[in-house]
């Protein structure tokens, strides 16, 4: 029950957006998933996400 209330709170405050482009550590990534290869040698990521309006 508490999980449902928390989920509803999150759902009301955030909205799903379509990702058009994602830049991770200065390199463009395909899709919207950051691969493990990109993160294996670093403890910090710089991520820029470009979205599309519906």
Image: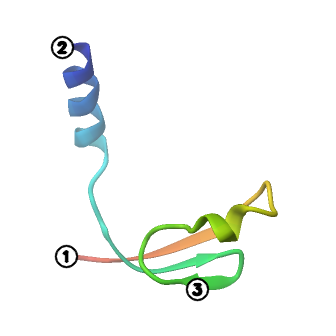
Residue at mark 1 to residue at mark 2: CA–CA distance = 32 Å
Say which residue label 2 marks.
Answer: 1
Write the residue at 27% across / 54% down: 15
Packing grade of label 3 (10 A; few <14, some 14-19, many >=20) is few
Q: Do we see residue 46 in this rendering?
A: no
Kind of element beneath mark 2: loop
Vertically, is 20 above or below 42? below
Left or right: residue 27 compared with residue 19: right
Write the residue at 58% across / 72% down: 48
**Quadrant that contains the N terminus:** top left
Write the residue at 74% across / 62% down: 40
Between disc 2 and disc 3, whose residue precedes?
2
Residue at mark 2 to residue at mark 3: CA–CA distance = 41 Å
Say which residue label 3 marks.
Answer: 28
Vertically, is 47 above or below 28? above
Left or right: residue 35 compared with residue 45: left
Q: Nearer the viewer, residue 9 or 34?
A: 34
Occupied quadrant, residue 5: top left
Q: Nearer the viewer, residue 24 or 13?
A: 24
Q: Nearer the viewer's eye, disc 1 or disc 2?
A: 2
Write the residue at 62% across / 68% down: 47
Please provide percent x and percent y for residue 18: 30, 72
Q: Are marks 3 and 1 in contact (CB under 8 Å)?
A: no
Occupied quadrant, residue 24: bottom right
Between disc 1 and disc 2, whose residue precedes?
2
Please provide percent x and percent y for residue 23: 59, 79
**Quadrant that contains the C terminus:** bottom left
Left or right: residue 44 compared with residue 11: right
Q: Residue furthest top?
A: 1
Say which residue label 1 marks.
Answer: 54
């Amino acid at each position: 029950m508490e999980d449902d209330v928390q989920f509803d709170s999150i759902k009301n405050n955030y909205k799903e957006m379509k990702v058009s482009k994602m830049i991770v550590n200065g390199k463009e990534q395909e899709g919207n998933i950051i691969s493990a290869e990109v993160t294996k040698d670093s403890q910090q990521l710089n991520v820029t996400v470009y979205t599309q309006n519906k």
